[in-house]
Image (cartoon, rainbow, N blue to C red):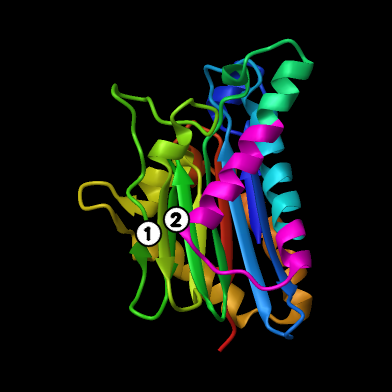
Amino acid sequence: MAASEIGTAHIANGSVCEDSCWALVEPLSTGQSFLSMFVSDGAGSAAKGGEGAELAIEAAAEFLTGKLRQGEFGFSDSLATELVMAVRDRIYAKAAADGLKARDFACTFLGVLSSPSGTLVFQIGDGGVVLDVGAGLEVAVTPMSGEYANMTHFVTDEDAIGVLATKVYPDPALRAAVFSDGLQRLALNMATNTPHDPFFTPFFNGLARATSEQEQQLQPLLVKFLGSAAVNERTDDDKTLALAVRPT
């Protein structure tokens, strides 16, 4: 399941939620399951940041559909680079068509691909990926910050491929979470860059125990949580959370 919810700061200034997300499990031709999760956070300083985030998710989903249609492929740094290039091409094309700069669509981009043959994590910008591949929850990639406070890297940056961080695991993800920077202070111990387990445990347990009927209720509950006073007291930013549990 996955959801994005507007932050109180955006409500106050009359803007919209500029986060976008994707989470899907689909069957492979082998009968095995393939998990894809993407999160993108539009830059508040960019005129079209929210649109850039939507374009990033759309481009990533289309790229993956094409890859899966071609058949088997390996998880690698080169696959992450291909994915990011597809996202960049979509955003740059839109910017050119609208007579704007790619920077006007600046957004972060991060996510997870996982199947029984392994797991790939990729990230440009802040936000985080927490997952368990058999040894407990871990932060796959250190969230990126820029040269100054409240700055980060974006998929639209000229050096985006150079700053792209990836991590490949030989095993499938048993539990995975991808989130935008609006949830970092709730989801991570920022001093040690480790997952705050009490934040994730209720979500993972709920997913693992849900019946097929209850699964339909989980996404609205996630939206309610993201917009709750308990969350808004800790962050005024847009917040996105995508979650998955592999059945045992």
Total tally of numbered discs in the picture = 2
User: Which residue sits at x=66%, y=62%?
Assistant: 1
Query: Which residue is labeled 1 in the image?
Result: 140
Viewer-closest of 71 and 50: 71
| Amino acid type shown at disc 2 | Val
Question: Does 122 lie within the magenta span?
Answer: no
Which numbered dot is residue 129?
2
Q: Which image quadrant for residue 212?
A: bottom right
User: Which residue sits at x=76%, y=59%?
Assistant: 65
Viewer-closest of 23 and 217: 23
- Residue 133 screen position, x and y as percent: 42, 76
Question: Does 86 lie within the magenta span?
Answer: yes
Q: Is residue 234 above or below residue 199?
A: above
Instruction: Tell whether 189 sits left or right of 232.
Output: left
Viewer-closest of 200 and 52: 52
> In terms of secondary structure, where does tag 1 sit?
loop
